[in-house]
Amino acid sequence: MVASRSLTRTLFDDGMYAVALVTPVLTLPQLVLIWTNRQTAGVSLVTWAAYTVMSGVWLIYSLLQRQKPLILSQACLFVVDFAVVLGVVIFRT
């Protein structure tokens, strides 16, 4: 029973790396629209700025806790979220 729980936890932990990589990828279509088409209509600067701040807070937490999947995910999310904010600021008319 203990070995089964350990294997399940290991598999789940390994799966979190996939989640950590997929989550920021889900933001890429928004980023592409902003940076290639310069389309910012309907994009909330306040919301994306809040996402960026929250990603930064989560990144600090994950660094303090030494949680590699969280570090990976939040570092990627912070960069992508910040790129969305920057694009909105630059291209908003």
Image (spheres, rainbow, N blue to C red):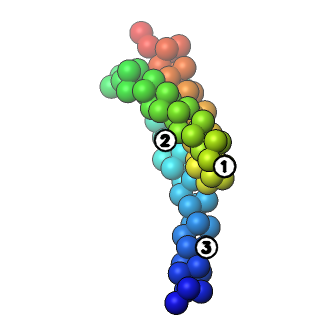
Count of numbered badges drawn on the protein:
3
Residue at the disc numbered 1: 66
Seen at 66% across and 53% down, the residue is 68
Label 2 sits on what residue type?
Answer: Thr
Q: For the residues carrying marks 1 and 2, which lies nearer the camera in this image?
A: 1
- Number of the label disc, if any, that sits on residue 10: 3
Tag shown at residue 82? none
1 or 2: tag closer to the N-terminus: 2
Q: Is residue 37 visible?
A: no
Residue 27 percent across, percent down from the top left: 49, 41
Of all residues shown, which one is farthest toward the left?
Answer: 42
Element carrying mark 1 = loop
**Real-space CA distance between mark 2 and mark 3, rounded to the nearest whole angstrom:** 28 Å
Q: Position of residue 44 (x, y in %)?
A: 36, 24
Which residue is at the front of the view, 77 or 34? 77
Per the image, the residue denoted by label 2 is 27
Q: Earlier in the sequence, mark 2 or mark 3?
A: 3
Q: Where in the figure is residue 61, as x and y percent of width and height?
A: 57, 40
Compared across the picture, whether 40 is left or right of 59 comes to: left
Q: Is residue 83 visible?
A: yes
Residue pictured at 62% horizontal, 47% vertical: 65
Rendered residue at 59%/81% (across/down): 7
Position of residue 68 relative to residue 88, above or below, is below
Residue at the far top in the pictured view = 93
Residue type at mark 3 is Thr
Using the image, determine if residue 61 lies above or below residue 82.
Answer: below
Residue at image point 55% right, 27% down = 82
Crowd rating for badge 1 (residues with CA inside 10 Å; few <14, some 14–19, many 20+) = few
Q: Amino acid at mark 1?
A: Arg
Crowdedness near tag 2: few (<14), some (14–19) or many (≥20) residues, C-alpha within 10 Å: some
Task: Identify which residue, 56 or 89, lies in the foreground.
Answer: 56
- Asked if the residues shown at circle 1 and circle 3 are in contact, with their CB atoms under 8 angstroms apart, the answer is no
